[in-house]
Image: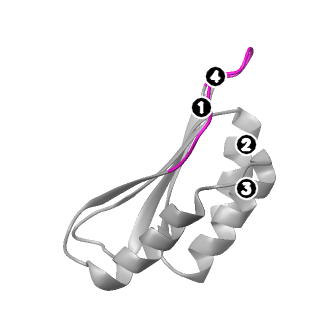
């Protein structure tokens, strides 16, 4: 299993990317956390932030799928999205999507 990490501007591009994540893995991300990301982008542009968008318990043949976001204090208009424990095929898909 691998991880994928990308930097995305907080706005329409982020919403589109998160929708693609939900479709790709047939999951529902925490909508309250997503709205908090957008709220914080407007309201708090000075502190570092960390978000847990999704975490799935272990299944028989698969490690725990975890999707996190983090905002650096020096770049409040962008967010790092990291997807952990995914296949090489999924990594390739998201690499192509974010190019």
Q: For mark 4, give the secondary structure.
A: loop
x and y, in percent, of residue 3 in the image: 55, 37
Q: CA distance from mark 2 to mark 3?
A: 13 Å
Pointers 2 and 4 in contact (C-beta within 8 Å):
no
Disc 4 marks which residue? 58
Quadrant in the picture for residue 80: bottom left
Q: Nearer the viewer, mark 2 or mark 4?
A: 4
x and y, in percent, of residue 63 in the image: 63, 23
Is residue 78 left or right of 74 when viewed as pictured?
right
Is residue 95 left or right of 45 when viewed as pictured?
right
Q: Which is the main secondary structure of the residues drawn in magenta? A: loop
Disc 3 marks which residue? 22
> Residue at the location (74% across, 61% down)?
20
Q: CA distance from mark 2 to mark 4?
A: 18 Å
**Is residue 91 or residue 83 the one in the foreground?**
83
Pointers 2 and 1 in contact (C-beta within 8 Å):
yes
Which tag, 2 or 1, sits closer to the chain's start? Answer: 1
**Colour treatment of the image:** one colour
Disc 1 marks which residue? 2
- The magenta segment is 53-63
Disc 2 marks which residue? 90
x and y, in percent, of residue 37 in the image: 44, 70
Which tag, 4 or 1, sits closer to the chain's start? Answer: 1
Instruction: Residue at the far bottom: name it.
Output: 42
Is residue 41 left or right of 5 when viewed as pictured?
left
- The 10 Å Cα crowd at callout 2, few under 14, some 14 to 19, many 20 or more, is some
Which tag, 4 or 3, sits closer to the chain's start? Answer: 3
Q: CA distance from mark 4 to mark 3?
A: 18 Å
Q: Is residue 86 above or below residue 36?
A: above
> Residue at the location (59% across, 31% down)?
2
Instruction: Residue at the far top: name it.
Output: 60
The C terminus: image quadrant: bottom right
């Amino acid at each position: 299993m691998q991880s994928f990490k990308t930097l995305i501007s907080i706005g329409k591009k982020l919403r589109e990317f998160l929708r693609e994540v939900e479709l790709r893995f047939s999951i529902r991300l925490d909508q309250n956390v997503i709205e908090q990301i957008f709220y914080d982008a407007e309201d708090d542009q000075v502190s570092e932030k960390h978000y847990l968008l999704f975490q799935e318990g272990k299944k028989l043949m698969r490690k725990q799928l975890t999707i996190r976001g983090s905002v650096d204090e020096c770049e409040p208009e962008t967010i790092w999205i990291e997807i952990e424990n995914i296949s090489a095929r999924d990594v390739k898909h998201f690499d192509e999507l974010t190019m």
